[in-house]
Amino acid sequence: MQLSQMFVHPMKSARGISYSRAYASQQGLLHDREWLLVTPEGRFLTAREFPRMVLIEMDLIPGGMLLKAPGMPAVMAMTQVYTLPVVTAVWKDEFSALHGDSHVDGWFSQYMGIPCKLLWLGMHSRRTLQSGNTPMSFADGYPYLLVNQASLDALNQDLPQAVSLRHFRPNLVIDGAMPYEEDDWSVIRIGDILFDVAKPCTRCQLTTVDPQTGEFSSDNEPMHTLIRTRQLPEGICFGVNLVARSEGILELGAAVEVVESRYTF
């Protein structure tokens, strides 16, 4: 088995960037989900509610990012002006982040059609994994999301129309495993880094947002098929959430080894 693809999503719910080499920390891949769009009151916004967010693109530049979206001029968000602490939350997890650029807020408000603000996580996250002291980005619940290519291929055989990896927004993609083999893993090694498999990743309507059009699918796929085929004790699952035990560089082609499984035969 090997690491076949890597994606960093600099802003929660926006389009990801494909990498061949990336720094992996306990918080996640470098720059992953370090920006968050919120309402003026601090409620976080995602493509579950505003599917056009998946069309927002960004290029990472020194000290910030260049933002692009359909029908909008490009704009830069620079971290040096994000200095004002504000309270926000991801689901029920409340913490503080940094606000700073009203011009960028206006850009997002125009694109989204509602007043909103952009927040930056800062150099040091003020949020931690609920089960410990691991620093967290703006990700839903865990630092990493892994998808098995063979599992996606198996799912696509059941779908009326194939979906892409980007429907599931993974950080890490592996090749060479059996379909849904990842359900049984508890500890894996990718390159030199050990990862604990925290839990299967539970899925929601976000999977039905087409990453190319920014619209919900008319047939509720792939969620309709996942409800039928992927009901686990944790919920409707596809992929697994990981927590890194150490930090280092990940490169495509790195070997993936199962260190511990949940079941012994």
Image (cartoon, helix red, strand yellow):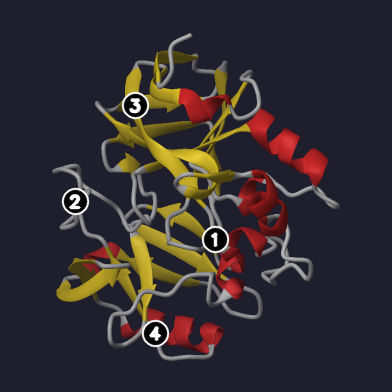
Residue at 14% x, 43% y is: 133
Please name whichever residue, 237 or 34, is drawn nearer the observer in this view of the structure: 237
Between the residue at mark 4 and the residue at mark 3, the CA separation in whole angstroms equals 36 Å
Residue at 61% x, 20% y is: 177
- Answer left or right for 182 relative to 86: right
Q: Position of residue 223 (x, y in %)?
A: 66, 57
Q: Nearer the viewer, mark 3 or mark 1?
A: 1
Q: Are marks 3 and 1 in contact (CB under 8 Å)?
A: no
Q: Which residue matches tag 2?
A: 128
Q: Residues within 10 Å of mark 4 (few under 14, many from 20)?
A: many
Q: Quadrant of residue 253?
A: top right
Q: Quadrant of residue 77?
A: bottom left
Say which label, 3 or 1, has the lower sequence index.
3
Residue at 46% x, 87% y is: 109
**94 in relation to 223, above or below:** below
Between the residue at mark 3 and the residue at mark 1, the CA separation in whole angstroms equals 24 Å
Q: Which residue is most to the top?
A: 265
Between the residue at mark 3 and the residue at mark 2, the CA separation in whole angstroms equals 17 Å
Q: Residues within 10 Å of mark 2 (few under 14, many from 20)?
A: some
Q: Amino acid at mark 1?
A: Cys
Residue at 42% x, 55% y is: 10
Between the residue at mark 2 and the residue at mark 4, the CA separation in whole angstroms equals 25 Å
Q: Nearer the viewer, mark 2 or mark 4?
A: 2
Q: Amino acid at mark 3?
A: Phe
State the SS at label 3: strand
Say which label, 1 or 4, has the lower sequence index.
4
Q: Quadrant of residue 54?
A: bottom right
Say which label, 2 or 1, has the lower sequence index.
2
Q: Which residue matches tag 1?
A: 204
Label number found at residue 116: 4
Say which label, 3 or 2, has the lower sequence index.
2
